[in-house]
Image (tube, rainbow, N blue to C red):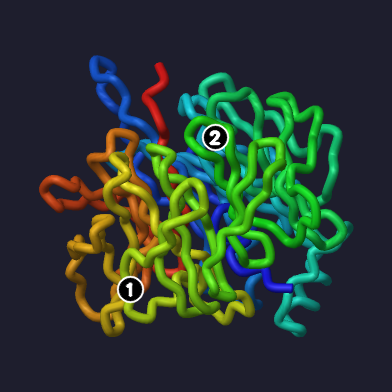
């Protein structure tokens, strides 16, 4: 079983020093002027990237963070939830109103981690792994482990809010099979919506009106009603299909299609028809290594995203030894947004709520930092200020500006 993409979307203390993991978080500590409305936050995950010992040695240093969009006021979230040196937190998203953060809380048995390194595969069994998805209100300092209530699995990722409803979606791992579920906002009434004949499913996405779902199951794209009924496979003719994402206007689905490690962005209508390729990624494998040591996994999925007006997509593309950031219209016209020096890699773009900016990661001079770009001027500024051996990954833009 392949777990490609499991770490692309997983999911309060001020900036602090962690003696057990041996590095400091180096965000700027200044605050916005009291007379000004505070800037929105960017949530992200910070970790060590070069510790010896393989994947788990670095993954267990993951800490959910948030920082203002100008790079100020960086802080760690939910430090008190970390039980021991083998557990971690990961920032995974925001509620639609921007008031609550979605945070993954993970743990792995170090003996199992050693076995995984030796066998170069995951063994995500109960008692060896645990992952929960938490909702955290940074202002009220309240936290709710919604996947831990009436628990259906030891491994629960992919939490999101179902638009137009009060329900939440998530993806538990049950008897080795990942399935889409929905539940009430208090974590109760969990229900499998994978439909009949459900296989290994991930990449759960809801239409803007909350009436339909899409996900990839056994690496084929499916569309269904929100309750799992009327499930339909999108016929692509390709063995690998991954990460479906509804357009903001609800008319189309964007996803990767092709072969594993050699796929490109495709579009299909909301009815599953009209399949076409949008752009060629130049051989980019659509994953970004987030460690500087050997990782038996394939890195973190680096997926295309929609513009706010649904008329273009943002994505990364291979250009020699560089990975550049691009914007491509639905007609197939591509604009290069970055022109980098040799060896620079960009990853994980996310649009701002007003569609005027992008936040994204960029590995420069050996360090993975976060940057924000003004799309009108193409000017960028650096948001994180990390050192060699540290990395910032998986940015998520706060949707609104809560008081």
Mark with earlier residue (2, 1): 2
Outermost residue on the left side: it is: 377
Q: Image quarter for residue 336? A: bottom left
- Closest to the observer: 67 or 103? 103
Q: Quote the CA–CA distance across marks 2 and 1.
A: 34 Å
Q: Image quarter for residue 59? A: bottom right
Q: Nearer the viewer, mark 2 or mark 1?
A: 1
- Closest to the observer: 252 or 139? 252
- 63 over 352 or under it: above or below: below
Q: Position of residue 274 (x, y in %)?
A: 42, 57
Q: Position of residue 178 (x, y in %)?
A: 75, 56
Q: Image quarter for residue 340? A: bottom left
Q: Which mark is residue 280?
A: 1
- Closest to the observer: 52 or 126? 126
Q: Which mark is residue 101?
A: 2
Q: Are the two marked residues, 2 and 1, in contact with CB atoms closer than 8 angstroms?
A: no
Q: Residue at x 71, y 57 (%)?
A: 85
Category of crowding for the residue at label 2, using alpha-carbon neighbours closer than 10 angstroms: few (below 14), some (14–19), many (at least 20): many
Q: Residue at x 63, y 72 (%)?
A: 55
Name the secondary structure under disc 1. Answer: loop
Q: Answer with left or right where residue 316 lies relative to residue 341.
A: right
Q: Position of residue 191 (x, y in %)?
A: 79, 37
Q: Which mark is residue 216?
A: none
Q: What is the quadrant of the C terminus in the image? A: top left
Category of crowding for the residue at label 1, using alpha-carbon neighbours closer than 10 angstroms: few (below 14), some (14–19), many (at least 20): some
Residue 387 visible in image: no
Q: Position of residue 205 (x, y in %)?
A: 56, 46
- 331 over 293 or under it: above or below: above
- 188 over 202 or under it: above or below: above
Q: Answer with left or right where residue 338 lies relative to residue 292.
A: left
Name the secondary structure under disc 2. Answer: strand
């Amino acid at each position: 079983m392949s777990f490609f993409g499991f770490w692309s979307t997983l999911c309060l203390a001020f900036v602090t020093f962690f003696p057990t993991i041996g590095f400091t978080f180096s965000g700027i500590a200044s605050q916005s002027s009291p007379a000004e409305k505070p800037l929105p936050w960017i949530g992200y995950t910070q970790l060590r990237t070069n510790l010896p010992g393989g994947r788990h040695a670095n993954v267990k240093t993951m800490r959910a963070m948030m920082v203002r969009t100008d790079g100020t006021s960086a802080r760690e979230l939910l430090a008190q939830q970390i039980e021991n040196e083998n557990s971690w937190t990961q920032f995974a998203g925001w509620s639609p109103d921007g008031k609550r953060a979605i945070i993954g809380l993970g743990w792995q048995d170090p003996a199992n981690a050693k076995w995984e390194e030796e066998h170069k595969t995951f063994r995500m069994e109960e008692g060896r792994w645990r992952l929960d998805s938490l909702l955290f209100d940074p202002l009220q300092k309240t936290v709710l482990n919604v996947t831990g209530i009436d628990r259906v699995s030891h491994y629960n990722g992919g939490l999101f809010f179902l638009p137009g409803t009060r329900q939440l979606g998530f993806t538990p791992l049950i008897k080795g099979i990942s399935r889409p579920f929905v539940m009430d906002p208090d974590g109760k009434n969990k229900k499998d919506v994978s439909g009949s004949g459900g296989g290994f499913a991930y990449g759960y996405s809801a239409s803007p009106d909350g009436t339909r779902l899409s996900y990839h199951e056994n690496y084929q794209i499916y569309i269904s009603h929100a309750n799992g009924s009327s499930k339909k496979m999108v016929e692509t003719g390709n063995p690998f299909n991954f990460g479906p994402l509804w357009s903001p206007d609800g008319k189309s689905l964007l996803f990767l299609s092709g072969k594993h490690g050699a796929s490109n962005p495709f579009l299909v209508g909301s009815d599953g028809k009209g399949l076409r390729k949008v752009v060629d990624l130049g051989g980019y494998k659509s994953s970004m290594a987030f460690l500087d040591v050997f990782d038996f996994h394939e890195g973190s999925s680096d997926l295309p995203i929609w513009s706010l007006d649904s008329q273009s997509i943002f994505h990364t593309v291979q250009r020699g030894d560089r990975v550049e950031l691009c914007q491509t219209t639905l007609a197939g016209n591509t604009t290069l947004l970055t022109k980098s020096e040799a060896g620079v890699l960009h990853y994980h773009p996310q649009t701002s709520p007003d569609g005027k900016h992008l936040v994204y990661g960029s590995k420069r001079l050996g360090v993975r930092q976060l940057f924000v770009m003004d799309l009108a001027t193409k000017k960028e500024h650096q948001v994180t200020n990390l050192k060699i051996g540290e990395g910032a990954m998986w940015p998520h833009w706060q949707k609104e500006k809560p008081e």
